[in-house]
Amino acid sequence: MDSNPMELFRKEAPEVAAAFNSLIMSLVASQGLDQKTKQLIYIAMKAAMGDDSAVKAHVPMAKAAGATREEVVDAILMTLTVSGIRGVVHCLPGALEFFEK
């Protein structure tokens, strides 16, 4: 079994995966928000869901777009009022690991 869930998705449902990728690319190309802000919002949304693997995947993208460690921490902490402590305790450690390297 593929260890990368996205690779498995592409393998098992290539047409759906391609459509999903097109959706993502159109969101990335939209002009309303800069890429750093989009990444920070995405990190906060995924942290609110407790999805630490998605947060870990997007922290490098956020940093590449100019996000600082403090901005990533704030994005994750913003989830406290929405989903409680779960997202913070599941996602903050992995996000900070990237900045510790």
Image (tube, rainbow, N blue to C red):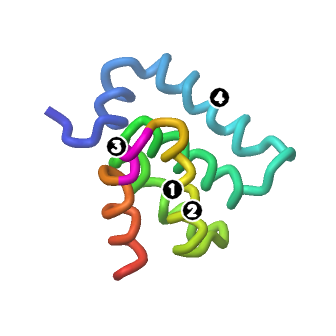
| Closer mark to the observer between disc 4 and disc 2 | 2
Magenta-colored span: 84-88
34 vs 97: above or below: above
Q: Amino acid at mark 1?
A: Leu
| Residue that label 2 marks | 74
* Marks 1/4: CA–CA distance: 28 Å
Q: Amino acid at mark 2?
A: Asp
Q: Secondary structure at mark 3?
A: helix
Label 2–label 3 contact, CB within 8 A = no
Q: Residue at x 86, y 46 (%)?
A: 31
Q: Position of residue 7 (x, y in %)?
A: 33, 36
Q: Residue furthest bottom?
A: 101
| Residue that label 3 marks | 86
Q: Position of residue 29 (x, y in %)?
A: 77, 44
* Marks 4/2: CA–CA distance: 27 Å
The first of marks 2 and 3 along the sequence is: 2
Label 1–label 2 contact, CB within 8 A = yes
* Marks 2/3: CA–CA distance: 15 Å
Q: Residue furthest left?
A: 1
Q: Amino acid at mark 4?
A: Leu
| Residue that label 4 marks | 23
Q: Return the mark for residue 77.
A: 1
Mark 2 Cα within 10 Å, few/some/many (few <14, many 20+)? some
- 64 in the magenta segment: no
Q: Residue at x 52, y 45 (%)?
A: 79
Q: Residue at x 59, y 75 (%)?
A: 68
Label 4–label 3 contact, CB within 8 A = no
